[in-house]
Each structure stands twice: as structure tokens, then as C-alpha cells.
Image: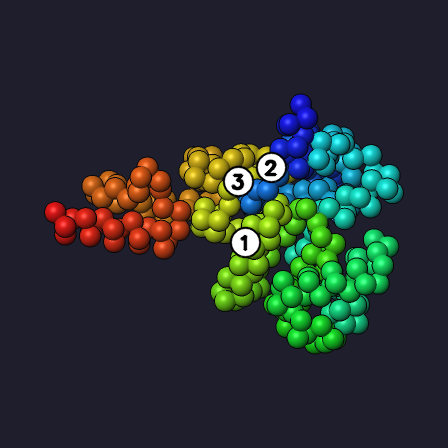
């Protein structure tokens, strides 16, 4: 029992939630997030991804069902929420909904200030957070002068300054160019290597296939499927719901039909680069024969 609690850092059980206008946000939604995982949440617009995240850091409260952190069910007391929000950091989809201070440094300091830390500790945390997203040079810039990508990084720094155990990002790639996307992925990979649990909402099936170790698929506020992307994204009902399967998996399957197996030691390629590698090493083996 204790082991199970330690293994799942966040857990929703049968969560029901309706917005004040009566719209269903979540419908008996149950989901466990494994500690240390790289989880993506997929689902059509309106499937409930943002609502799920707002439940995970206590901004919204279930009408029925429970949300637990580290095995303890939230009771939504001031203390409980304070504790939760220092451990679960949420980066909103729109940076303008998150940034509100005059300068980047002030904004990034806001969270640690709220935690009641001393001045020196705050200074160290803010510098570290700015450094890890490459925003040291922009520290004293007015927030409203930042580019979209810089705003996004300032938001992430603000959350990192809280030193959360779980980092949740709501559609973080939207609006970023390719170079900025790969910068962001590098930042997230570093944080993950340092032990952080990362949860991302995205529409990118190929990114999920290559990057995530777990994927949760939402459909009309409920969990349709959850598990390893190599398994879940190939399920017929998931493919139907998302409208596509990972391109690498489709190409690998078509190649297999034409007699070219790209399974490398029983391991399927999960990225375009991995598939190219597998094909090249096959052709080298053919040539050696
Ligand atoms: N503030 C709100 N008031 C009323 N309905 C909302 C509100 N926010 C979201 N919804 C509705 O809740 C459902 C889930 O939305 P959301 O969690 O934003 O989905 P997603 O992030 O997957 O696009 C949708 O039907 C959406 O229209
Ligand atoms: Mg959303």
C-alpha cells in the first residue's frame, strides 16, 4: 500500500466536475501519474486537458471524487493547497495569463516570496530558475517587451523557482517555432533527468510517441486510455479518437508489409531519426553479406 502511494505522485479517482454554466469538464475521470514519468495528455479540443491540470494543482475542486498527492487525499484546506502548489507547478497555455509583474525577475520571484523564504534563498532560486531556461540576460526586461517564446520561458522559470516535484505544461509547444520547441524539450529533458515528473498537454502524436513514457488520452472529460505510447497510440479506438497514429509506426508497418522489418533488437523505432538509423543499419548489413 505504502509502496503504491510512493509510486504514483498524483492520482485522480472518479473526478466529476462541471463549470458554473453547467458544461461538463471532467466525467468520472480517473488517472494515476507515475513519479518520475514523462507523461503527455492527448485529446481533442474540449476533451478536458486544461480542466484536468487545474484539478491537479487544486485551482479547481472536484464536485465528487478525489485528487491525491503522494498518496494523501487533498482536503483543500489553506495549508493543503499551499503545500500542493509548492510541489505541483502549472505553466498555463497563454503566458499572458501567468505573467503579471513589471519585470521578469520580479515575476519569477513572486512564487518563492509567497512561500515565505528568506531574501538570499529567493535570490538563489530565482537566478537558478532564470539560468535553467536561458533567461538571465532578460532578467530586468519589462515583461510586456518579451517575445512570445521568452514569455513562455519566463513562465517556466517562475514555476521552477518554486522547486516543484511535478511540472505541468498546458500545450507548451503551441506558438513556438521549431528551434524554440527543441530548446524547450532540452530544458524539460534536463529537469526530468534531475528527477522531476513532467506532464504535458499536446496535440503532437509523433512527439508523444518519441518522447513520452506514458500517455493519457482524454475523451469528453473521461480517460479513454493510459499507458506506454508504443501500445496506446496503436489502439484502434485511440487512433479513431485522435484521427491519426504516429507516422513512424505507420511507416514501419508499411515497410514490414513490403518485407523490410525495422525492429532493432525487438525495439521499434520511435522517432524519424530512429527509423532512418534502423534502415541504414539494415542496408549496411545487407551490403556486408
Ligand atoms: N470557464 C469555463 N466555463 C465553462 N465551460 C468551460 C470553461 N473552461 C472549459 N470549459 C468547457 O469544459 C470542457 C473541457 O475544456 P478544457 O478542459 O478546456 O479542454 P481542453 O483543454 O482539452 O481543450 C469543454 O467543453 C470546455 O468548453
Ligand atoms: Mg486546454
Instruction: Please report contact status of discs 2 and 3: CB closer than 8 Å, yes or no.
Output: yes
Which element carries disc 2, helix, strand or loop?
A: strand
Q: Is residue 60 visible?
A: no
- Which residue is at 19% across, 48% downward? 285
- Which residue is at 31% across, 39% downward? 265
Residue 118 image point, x, y percent: 85, 59
Residue 160 image point, x, y percent: 69, 56
Residue 60 image point, x, y percent: 77, 43
Q: Is residue 5 visible?
A: yes
Q: Quadrant of residue 142?
A: bottom right
Alpha carbon separation for disc pair 1 and 3: 15 Å
Q: Quadrant of residue 24?
A: top right
Q: Earlier in the sequence, mark 1 or mark 2?
A: 2
Q: Earlier in the sequence, mark 1 or mark 3?
A: 1
Alpha carbon separation for disc pair 2 and 3: 9 Å
Q: For mark 2, what is the residue?
A: 34
Q: For mark 1, what is the residue?
A: 189
Label 1 vs label 3, nearer the camera:
1
Which element carries disc 3, helix, strand or loop?
A: strand
Q: Residue furthest left?
A: 289
Alpha carbon separation for disc pair 1 and 2: 16 Å
User: Is the residue marked by circle 2 packed among few (<14), some (14-19), or many (20+) residues within 10 Å?
Assistant: many
Q: Is the residue 189 above or below the residue 10 in the image?
A: below
Question: Within 8 Å of ligand 1, the CB of disc 2?
Answer: no
User: Is the residue marked by circle 3 packed among few (<14), some (14-19), or many (20+) residues within 10 Å?
Assistant: many
Identify the mark at residue 214; answer none if there is no mark. Answer: 3
- Which residue is at 67% across, 30% downward? 5
Instruction: Please report contact status of discs 1 and 3: CB closer than 8 Å, yes or no.
Output: no
Q: Earlier in the sequence, mark 2 or mark 3?
A: 2
Residue 70 image point, x, y percent: 71, 35
Label 2 vs label 3, nearer the camera:
2
Amino acid at each position: 500500500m505504502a509502496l503504491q502511494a510512493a509510486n504514483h505522485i498524483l492520482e485522480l479517482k472518479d473526478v466529476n466536475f462541471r463549470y458554473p454554466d453547467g458544461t461538463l469538464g471532467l466525467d468520472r475521470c480517473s488517472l494515476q501519474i507515475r513519479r518520475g514519468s514523462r507523461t503527455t495528455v492527448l485529446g481533442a479540443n474540449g476533451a478536458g486537458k486544461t480542466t484536468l491540470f487545474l484539478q491537479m494543482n487544486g485551482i479547481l475542486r472536484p464536485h465528487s471524487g478525489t485528487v491525491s498527492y503522494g498518496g494523501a487525499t487533498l482536503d483543500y484546506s489553506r495549508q493543503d493547497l499551499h503545500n500542493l502548489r509548492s510541489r505541483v507547478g502549472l505553466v498555463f497555455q497563454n503566458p499572458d495569463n501567468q505573467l503579471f509583474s513589471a519585470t521578469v525577475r520580479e515575476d519569477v520571484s513572486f512564487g518563492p516570496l509567497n512561500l515565505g523564504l528568506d531574501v538570499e534563498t529567493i535570490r538563489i532560486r530565482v537566478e537558478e530558475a532564470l539560468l535553467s531556461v536561458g533567461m538571465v540576460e532578460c532578467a530586468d526586461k519589462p515583461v510586456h517587451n518579451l517575445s512570445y517564446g521568452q514569455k513562455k520561458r519566463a513562465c517556466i522559470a517562475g514555476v521552477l523557482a518554486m522547486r516543484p516535484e511535478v511540472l505541468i505544461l498546458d500545450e507548451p509547444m503551441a506558438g513556438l517555432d521549431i528551434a524554440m520547441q527543441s530548446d524547450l524539450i532540452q530544458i524539460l529533458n534536463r529537469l526530468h533527468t534531475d528527477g522531476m515528473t513532467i506532464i504535458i498537454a499536446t496535440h503532437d502524436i509523433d512527439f508523444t510517441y518519441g518522447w513520452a513514457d506514458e500517455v493519457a488520452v482524454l475523451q469528453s472529460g473521461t480517460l479513454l486510455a493510459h499507458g506506454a505510447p508504443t501500445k496506446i497510440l496503436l489502439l484502434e479506438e485511440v487512433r479513431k479518437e485522435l484521427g491519426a497514429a504516429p507516422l513512424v509506426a505507420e511507416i514501419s508497418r508499411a515497410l514490414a508489409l513490403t518485407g523490410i522489418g525495422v525492429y532493432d533488437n525487438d525495439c521499434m523505432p520511435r522517432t524519424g531519426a530512429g527509423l532512418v538509423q534502423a534502415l541504414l543499419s539494415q542496408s549496411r548489413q545487407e551490403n556486408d553479406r
